[in-house]
Structures are given as structure tokens and as C-alpha cells.
Image (tube, rainbow, N blue to C red):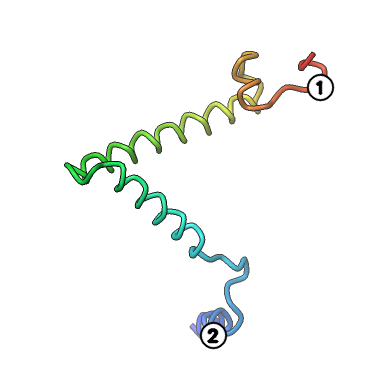
């Protein structure tokens, strides 16, 4: 238990080791949330905002999956072009 108290004291004194902060991502989230809210025209805004979030998250997931597959060698030329994963020899 003594070690735990020293760790928490040093984190409070000098910050976390990786300097992790959520300020920037939280600010970006708030800005994006406000943009989505404004686009709803304030009619059924919660449902519209949730639907937008679902679509955006789904697209992000698909993009990450396709990028991962391209890095693993499971891609066709179109997806490789879309994710800029072609070697110099294949771009000609």
C-alpha cells in the first residue's frame, strides 16, 4: 500500500507518465456535437444526433477494418488506392 501512495503522489506532482490529456479530444467532440445539433433544426434532435453518431462510428469502423486488411495483404487495387497502400511499383 505504501508504494501505491507514492505513485499517486508522484502523479499529482509531475503528471502522468505519458502526459495523457483529454482536453483536446473533448473539445473536438464538443465542436462536432454542436455542428450535428445545428444540422438537426432542433426537431427530434436526439434521435437525429444518435443516428448520425451510429453512422459516423460505423464508417470509422469500416475504414479501420479495410485499412487493417490492406496492411495484412488482403486487398484489391481499388481499396489499396483508397487507403494509399500501394508500393511505388504498383502506382504506375
SS for tag 1? helix
Question: Residue 56 falls in which quadrant of the image?
Answer: top left
Q: Quadrant of residue 44?
A: top left
Please give the residue where the numbered disc 1 appears in the rendered image: 88
Q: Which mark is residue 66?
A: none
| Nearer to the camera, 40 or 50 | 40
Q: Quadrant of the C terminus?
A: top right
Q: Is residue 19 above or below residue 79?
A: below
Q: Is residue 27 left or right of residue 50?
A: right
Q: Taking 5 as reference, is 85 above or below it?
A: above
Q: Residue at x 65, y 28 (%)?
A: 71
Label 2: which residue?
A: 9
Q: Nearer the viewer, residue 15 or 57?
A: 57
Give coordinates of residue 41: x percent, y percent: 23, 43
| Secondary structure state at the residue bearing disc 2 | helix
Q: CA distance from mark 2 to mark 1?
A: 52 Å
C-beta proximity under 8 Å, tags 2 and 1: no
Furthest toward the right, the residue is: 89
Badge 2 density bin: few <14, some 14–19, many ≥20, Cα 10 Å: few
Amino acid at each position: 500500500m505504501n508504494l501505491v501512495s507514492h505513485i499517486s503522489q508522484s502523479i499529482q506532482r509531475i503528471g502522468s507518465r505519458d502526459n495523457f490529456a483529454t482536453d483536446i479530444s473533448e473539445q473536438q467532440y464538443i465542436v462536432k456535437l454542436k455542428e450535428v445539433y445545428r444540422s438537426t433544426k432542433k426537431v427530434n434532435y436526439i434521435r437525429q444526433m444518435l443516428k448520425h453518431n451510429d453512422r459516423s462510428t460505423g464508417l470509422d469502423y469500416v475504414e479501420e477494418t479495410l485499412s487493417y486488411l490492406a496492411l495484412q495483404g488482403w486487398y484489391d487495387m481499388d481499396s489499396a488506392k483508397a487507403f494509399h497502400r500501394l508500393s511505388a511499383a504498383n502506382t504506375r
